[in-house]
Image (cartoon, rainbow, N blue to C red):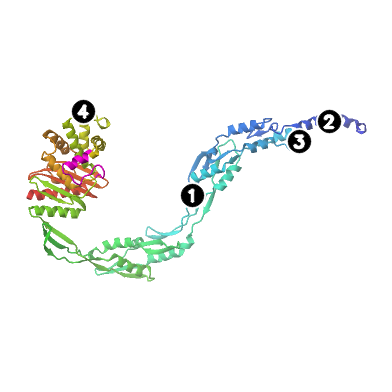
Amino acid sequence: MLQNVPKKLRGVLMVTGPVLLTVWVVQLAYPRSRALPFVTVAEKNMGFASEQTVASRLASQYKNVPLSLVLPDKTVKTSYVKVGFSVDTQRAVHEATAYPVWQRIIPFSLLAKGATTDVRVYMKPDTIRYDEFAKTVLASCRRDPVNAGVQVVEGSVVLAPAKDGYACDTTKLAKLLATKALSGKQPIVTVPLTKESPARTDRDVEPLLNTARRTLERRLILQASDGAKEVPKSQLAAWLQFSEKQDGKLALALNAEQVSTYLKTAHASLRVAPKPTVVTTLDGVETGRTSGAPGKEVDEAKTAANVQKSWLESSSKEAVATVILRDVAPGVAYSRSYSPTEAGLQALVNEIARDKGDYAIALRRSNGTTTQVNGTKQYHPASTYKMYVAWVVLKNIESGQMKWSDPAESGKTVEQCFDAMIVNSDNPCGEWFGLKIGWTNLNNQLKGIGLTCTNLSTAWVSCASDETLFLSKLESGQLLSGASQGRLLDVMKRQVYRSGIPAGVGVPVADKVGFIDGYLHDAAIVYSPKGTYELTIMTRGSSWAQIADAARQINAQIQRM
């Protein structure tokens, strides 16, 4: 067959034939599981590498690729892993090893294809992890659209233009991340946004804007008994407001609060103060009454309605609105006096409790008389319970069940904890002593000395009459020996909270206060010039200044008796 082929061509075929045959054999036999010769993957030579080697290198190289997501108001620095993406090794390996049969039969295509193939690396999403990232990190990527509005700025009616809103499009972002090939630089991806248009556009508010401008150009005269006054334009501007109706449209309205503020000053001369009815009492009983007289003041609501009708709702260039007045009923003022008697003292404490709110007052004087109002009303005792605890601690010291040097709470001795509990109202020490003594045991001992409305084991309550009775027995020496009595009175005289009864009476006081959750109490022994007395004031929703005022009034009455 070759005899018919020219000699030169026959020589060429004899030389190239074996070469071509060898190339075909090599190309047809080249392993499908190996990267093509000289192929690069992400600009790195991976020629002849096995699929496993290529996959392993990619997994290692792109294990934690940093990623910057550009949002409208910030840039989130994260990584593909945190976003829920990992390197698509399967895709890269396929492109590095792809060598179909039709290419294999083309001479020298193995080298040509390998040398010209540069596989780019892409990331692929884990849908569940990506959705979780989108819900947490991208949830704040939102700006609500702003509807167009009308506002008054420096005395002029101006448009508050509408603004588009936006939200991050997480679906488009996922596609973008999956189609963006990695390079040597840190990926910076601008997050796609979806536009959200406002419901009310600039054009929608143009009619209202024009109406408001015409209204502001209209003069307004307020007609009153003290004369006619034109409202300054700068003031009129403050009276305009724009309210949103249920259908989303804006309406021009009057700012009644601004109108009211103006009327109080501009027409203050129209106000005639009412003359109160004066009721004179002695020991709580009315002894005389002087009738008062009504006053006059601007009826702000009716006047504002007149302004609304004449200024906002009319089209005249000059509007006149009448200022309406209304009667003001006279109040009642009390001129109270108290006789220097028990009746006068009782009337005083009754009226203090009535005037000041949630109050209970119990008083015992050295002559054995008692005066009280709401004396058995139960309150949370707050820290006044600590004087009961201190009494039992001293009894246990006397009986030898405790020693001053015994260890107590937080590294303190019994003596240190005792002082802190009363002087500083220390809670941990009070609770430690209560548990040491036993709340039921303490409760039983209190009942044993006649306290009837105190319960420190199940209900945790006390009352003013019980606390005053306890202080009376303490002062008279019925509860403790002389030394122990002096020890307790000494720390009560040194307790640091002095803004209640001590501040009000202005004389030496041994007391224990309590305050918790709106409760304010003061239980005191008062050493007054007219004799020692015990006074407890228990309150809720009051103040130390009010308690001091009550104590001042009571002490002044006692000094007169």
**Residue under pointer 2:** 17
Question: How many residues crowd around disc 2 within 10 Å: few (fewer than 14), some, or many (20 or more)?
Answer: few
Q: Is residue 551 left or right of residue 244?
A: left
Q: CA distance from mark 3 to mark 2?
A: 17 Å
Say what secondary structure mark 1 lies in: strand
Q: Which residue is mark 1?
A: 142
Residue 493 placement: quadrant: top left
Q: Find the distance from the CA under tag 2 to the CA under tag 1.
A: 70 Å
> Which mark identifies residue 405?
4
Label located before the other in sequence (3 or 4)? 3
Q: CA distance from mark 4 to mark 1?
A: 66 Å
- Chain-order first, disc 2 or disc 4: 2
**In-front residue for pair 282/151:** 282
The answer to if 482 sits in the magenta stretch is no
Q: Regarding mark 2 in the picture, which secondary structure is present there? A: helix
**Residue pointed to by mark 3:** 104
Mark 2 vs mark 4, foreground winner is 4
* Residue 12 location (% of width, % of height): 85, 30
Which comes before the other along the chain, label 3 or label 1?
3
Mark earlier in primary sequence (3, 2): 2
Q: CA distance from mark 2 to mark 4?
A: 114 Å
Magenta range: 441-460
